[in-house]
Amino acid sequence: MDFTHFDSQGKATMVDITEKQPTKRIARASAIVIMAKETLELIKSGGIKKGDVLAVANIAGIAAAKETYRSILMCHNIPLSYCKMNFDFLSATELRISAEACAYAKTGVEMEALNAVCAAALNIYDMCKSVDKNISFQQVCLDYKTGGKSGTYARSEQ
């Protein structure tokens, strides 16, 4: 397997996408946030003192997707067409965060979708840490991507 982020001398480098053709790129990622039942109830009822947890997580995820190139050092700055966040209550203790990023670009938006769910999860932790320091994140993963020469990828259930 060849890694594209190394030059001929083995030094880290940004991939040259000059000659690539833009295509519509879509990526979906998700993460599970695990917390105490009482914490999830506080989120649902608006009882977290810092404010509307999911509203903040939504904005944080979108903002993070737009700024991915600043924290993922070899990423290109991609002008996104959109980033959509979604939050689903899976159980009494589990919240699923999902993000879909889209761009018409020369390179994919997988990192933007992954960055969005991670930032949303971190903001949920920050807003709820005063009542639950045991919050954890699991199954951060790319669920789907399409566009570009590698085509479509859909995560298989494991």
Image: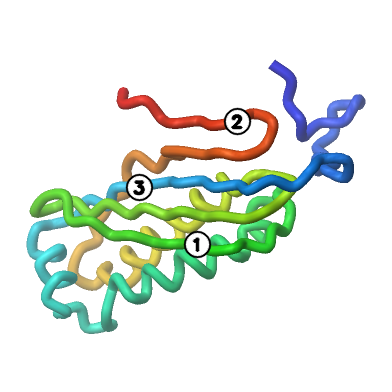
Q: CA distance from mark 2 to mark 3?
A: 23 Å
**In this rendering, which labeled residue sits more in front, label 1 or label 2?**
2
Residue 122 in the figure: left or right of residue 153: left
Residue type, label 1: Cys
Is residue 17 in sight in this rendering?
Answer: yes
Confirm or deny contact between disc 1 and disc 3 (CB under 8 A): no
Q: Nearer the viewer, residue 41 or 58?
A: 58
**In this rendering, which labeled residue sits more in front, label 1 or label 3?**
1
Residue at the extreme top of the image, as rendered? 1
- Residue 110 on image: x %, y %: 56, 45
Residue type, label 2: Gly
Residue 115 in the figure: left or right of residue 126: right
**In this rendering, which labeled residue sits more in front, label 2 or label 3?**
2
- Residue 47 on image: x %, y %: 14, 79
Q: Mark 3, residues whose alpha carbon is within 10 Å: few (<14), some, or many (≥20)?
A: many
Q: Eyeballing the image, is 55 above or below 125?
A: below
Disc 3 target residue: 31
Q: Mark 1, residues whose alpha carbon is within 10 Å: few (<14), some, or many (≥20)?
A: many
Residue type, label 3: Ala
Residue 12 in the figure: left or right of residue 59: right
Mark 1 or mark 3, earlier in chain:
3
* Quarter of the image where the N terminus is located: top right
- Residue 131: numbered disc: none
Disc 1 target residue: 83
Disc 2 target residue: 151
